[in-house]
Image (cartoon, rainbow, N blue to C red):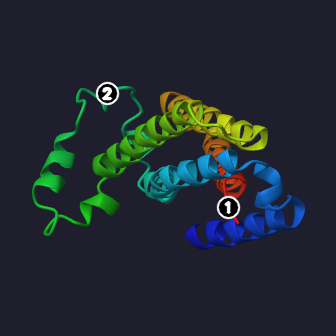
Amino acid sequence: WTAALTIYTGVVWNALSLLRPSPTSLHGTTKALTAASRLRRLTLPVTACVALTLISGPFVAGNDAGRAYNTWPKMLDDWVPPEWTAAVSNPLTKWRAFFEDTAVVQFGHRTLAYASVAGSLGIWAYSLQLPLSPAAAAAVRLLPMAVGAQMCLGIATLLLYVPIELGVAHQAGGVAVLTTLLFVMHTLRTP
């Protein structure tokens, strides 16, 4: 999954570089170029969070965590599962729990998804204060919509006990979020 996403990222980035205008002509003014540069720096942590969320997804699928904890917003009866607390309290000896324990993996994926949604909304809200070019503003508007739709799809997949169709759609949604994020980062690039 990670190798496939890495190759996909390279292909999409190169395709965008070939098909889109240069950053100078895309942003137009010096103010828009400076605003894009500022926003791009703030978008990098959100990119990392979305990437971690994408990478954590296969661990959820591999552990059948969606079938074991198919309630939302709580995980069965707990907001924070006790397995998570045990793993976090001693991560050096329980590091495998972050990859193998069903509750820990599911909670980690949920937490990363919430952080991805909050980060993308924060980037969008901050972009409203900046003098971005119309192309950059339009690209940034797409990000919270894609991430929010993906989170809703994930919740629906969970609550319906992970039907194959929704599970596959959730994976495809992850690739759609990655594509949107690449489009935003490519649009915000500076010369």
Query: What's the CA distance linking mark 2 and mark 1?
Result: 43 Å
Q: Is residue 170 visible?
A: yes
The answer to which image quadrant residue 164 occupies is top right
- Relative side of 134 to 68, left or right: right
Q: Which residue appears farthest toward the right when viewing the image?
A: 19
Q: Which mark is residue 39?
A: none
Q: Which residue is mark 1?
A: 190
**Where the C terminus falls, by quadrant?**
bottom right
Q: Please name which of the two marks, 2 or 1, marks the residue nearer to the observer.
A: 1
**For the residues bearing labels 2 and 1, Cβ distance under 8 angstroms:** no
The percent coordinates of residue 133 (x first, y second) are 74, 41
**Element on which disc 1 rests:** loop
With respect to residue 55, does 35 lie above or below? Answer: above
The percent coordinates of residue 64 (x first, y second) are 44, 49
- Relative side of 30 to 158, left or right: right
**Element on which disc 2 rests:** loop
With respect to residue 81, does 49 lie above or below? Answer: below
Q: Residues within 10 Å of mark 2 (few under 14, many from 20)?
A: few
The three-letter amino acid code for the residue at tag 2 is Lys
Residue nearest the observer in this picture, 141 or 135 = 135
Residue found at x 10% / y 60%: 90
With respect to residue 80, does 5 lie above or below? Answer: below
**Where the N terminus falls, by quadrant?**
bottom right
Residue found at x 44% / y 51%: 60
Residue nearest the observer in this picture, 46 or 110 = 46
- Relative side of 96 to 32, left or right: left
Q: Which mark is residue 74?
A: 2
The percent coordinates of residue 62 (x first, y second) are 46, 58
The three-letter amino acid code for the residue at tag 1 is Thr
The percent coordinates of residue 111 (x first, y second) are 36, 42
Residue found at x 17% / y 64%: 94
Q: Is residue 176 visible?
A: no
